[in-house]
Image (cartoon, helix red, strand yellow):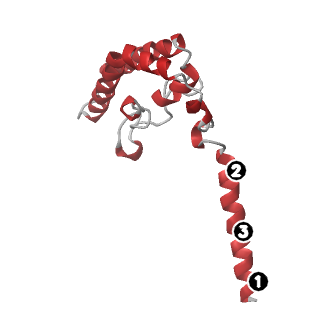
Amino acid sequence: MKKTMIMGIAVLMGLMISGSVYAMGPGGWHGMGFTAVANLNIESVKKFLRDTTDARNELILKRIELVKAYAAKEVNYDKVASIQKEIIDLKTKILDAARKYGLDKEIGPWFGMKHGMMGNGMRPGMNGMGPGGMMGCPCNTPQ
């Protein structure tokens, strides 16, 4: 009886684990695996990084400003909206540069631009990191 119960639990756990791995897809949540990085043209990436250095640095600063604006005792939503607009403009500028070098599909997810959306799915207060979190932060971008 015990042996059958233990075997049943082991099979059930195996099915649950394999089901979640199958649902995630190749390459985790991006769904593109290592092939997207392996097929990149290194010279195009170097030119893209060189052309967008200022915009990426400004994007980091704007995200910090946004976190501080949300953390203020009295949130000024006009200021928050203007910072968010500036962030969208910077992301658009970066994505346009990526398109110029044919890297928009590969580089977009690094900046939280998944499927043409301008955000990384996180909302204010998630994981105590403030709006947007740090997942889509360009400081996490491989250089």
Tell me which corner region of the image, top left, top right, bottom left or bottom right, holds residue 94.
top left
Q: Mark 3 sits on what residue?
A: 12
Q: Quadrant of the C terminus?
A: top left
Which amino acid lies under the numbered mark 3 shown in the image of this protein?
Leu
C-alpha span from label 2 to label 1: 27 Å
Q: Is residue 21 left or right of residue 114?
A: right
Q: Is residue 59 left or right of residue 100?
A: left
Characterize the local packing of mark 1: few (<14), some (14-19) or many (20 or more) Cα atoms within 10 angstroms: few
Disc 1, SS: helix
- Dot label at residue 22: 2
Disc 2, SS: helix
Mark 3 and 2 residues: CB-CB less than 8 Å, in contact? Answer: no
C-alpha span from label 3 to label 1: 12 Å
Which amino acid lies under the numbered mark 2 shown in the image of this protein?
Tyr
The label nearer to you, 2 versus 1, is: 2
The percent position of residue 107, horizontal first and vertical second, equals 51, 25
Is residue 88 in view?
Answer: no
Characterize the local packing of mark 2: few (<14), some (14-19) or many (20 or more) Cα atoms within 10 angstroms: few
- Dot label at residue 4: 1
Q: Name the residue located 76 percent from the left edge and 83 percent from the top edge.
A: 4
The percent position of residue 59, horizontal first and vertical second, equals 35, 22
User: Considering only order in the chain, which callout, 2 or 3, is on the residue closer to the N terminus?
Assistant: 3
Which amino acid lies under the numbered mark 1 shown in the image of this protein?
Thr
Is residue 2 in view?
Answer: yes
User: Considering only order in the chain, which callout, 1 or 2, is on the residue closer to the N terminus?
Assistant: 1
Residue 136 vs residue 105, the one in the foreground: 105
* Vertical arrangement, residue 65 with respect to residue 50, above or below: below
Q: Name the residue located 70 percent from the left edge and 81 percent from the top edge.
A: 6
Q: Quadrant of the N terminus?
A: bottom right
